[in-house]
Image (cartoon, grey):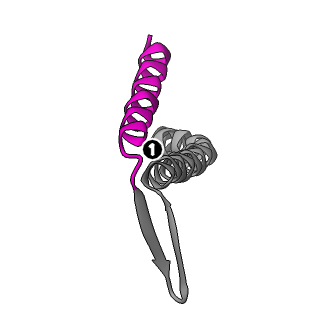
Amino acid sequence: MRQKIRWFLLLAGVIVALAIAVQNNAMAEVKLFFFSRDVPLSLLIVTSAGAGFLLGSLMTYSMLRAQKKTEPKAKEVKTAPKQAEAVDELRGQTK
């Protein structure tokens, strides 16, 4: 169910971005240091939306990858107090 909601939201975002881009067909001047060029505003909107999506996807991927690496360690931390109690009990029995 969550996957369907995510796909729906992604599709809705793409449709909104494209609608905004199509309705803004004026030219805009882009300046970067010594570079200056007139480009369609729709191209700027689509490029910006695409770059934002790409950066967001990369960040999400890296966060999920890091989370998968730390999950086994988190399980060890949760079981450590129980293991420590068991060791303490064994030490108490041997004395």
- Return the residue at label 1: 81
What's the amino acid at mark 1?
Pro
Q: Is residue 27 above or below residue 76?
A: below
Where residue 57 appears, as percent x and y from the top left, is 55, 45
What is the crowding at mark 1: few (fewer than 14 residues within 10 Å), some, or many (at least 20)? few
Q: Is residue 93 visible?
A: no
Where residue 88 appears, as percent x and y from the top left, is 49, 47
> Residue pushed farthest top?
1
Where residue 24 appears, as percent x and y from the top left, is 36, 45
Count of numbered circles in the view:
1
Asked if the stretch drawn in magenta spans residue 24, the answer is yes
Q: Is residue 16 above or below residue 29?
A: above
Asked if the stretch drawn in magenta spans residue 85, the answer is no
Q: Tell me where the magenta segment starts and ends, as one range.
A: 1-26
Magenta-colored segment: predominant secondary structure: helix
* Quadrant in the picture for residue 21: top left
Residue at horizontal 36 percent and vertical 38 percent from the top? 23
Residue at horizontal 43 percent and vertical 17 percent from the top? 2
Disc 1, SS: helix
Where residue 66 appears, as percent x and y from the top left, is 59, 50
Residue at horizontal 41 percent and vertical 17 percent from the top? 5
Image quarter of the N terminus? top left
Q: Is residue 86 visible?
A: yes
Q: Is residue 22 above or below residue 39?
A: above
